[in-house]
Image (cartoon, grey):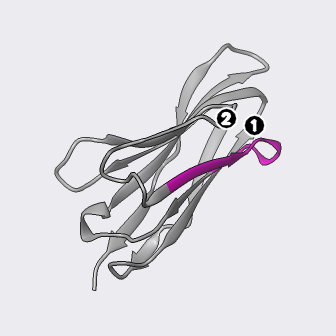
Amino acid sequence: QVQLVESGGGLVQPGGSLRLSCAASGSIFSINAMAWYRQAPGKLRELVATITRGDSTNYADSVKGRFTISRDNAKNTVYLQMNSLKPEDTAVYYCNANIATTFQPRYNYWGKGTLVTVSS
């Protein structure tokens, strides 16, 4: 069984910064692409950023230049550094990872989410 656990969310003022973390645990054989999604109240879940095992990254236009995704393969962890936060960044942020375990091939796993609130 695989678990993804996010941390680092909270309340921050506009213009501030937060760093989200997501750690994968369980019978992991390999972790391929990892990603962060977010879902604001009343809206669909949207892709924020992705990172491959080789550290190639992609970002939603709305966060380019402000957010940075990174990963530590030794720790099975992905991070999202969020700077210059805006009220429209308020959402629940979810971690996603494509993981192969000892018992089954690649599968997309989700964390339970961490709430980020940007407000003065």
Tell me the amino acid under the disc marked 1.
Gly
Which residue sits at x=75%, y=16%? 103
Residue at the (32%, 74%) spot, across then down = 118
Q: Secondary structure at mark 1?
A: strand
Q: Position of residue 78 (x, y in %)?
A: 63, 48
Residue 109, percent across and down?
Answer: 55, 32
Quadrant of the image containing the N terminus: top right
Query: Does the segment drawn in magenta span residue 58?
Result: no
In-image side of 75 versus 21 (left or right)? right
Question: Overall secondary structure of the magenta stretch?
Answer: strand
Report how far apart the C-alphas of labels 2 and 1 lie in the structure: 5 Å
Label 1 belongs to which residue? 26
* Residue hosting label 2: 2
Amino acid at pointer 2: Val
Q: Residues within 10 Å of mark 1 (few under 14, many from 20)?
A: few
Q: Is 111 placed left or right of 15 in the picture?
A: right
Q: Residue at x 63, y 49 (%)?
A: 70
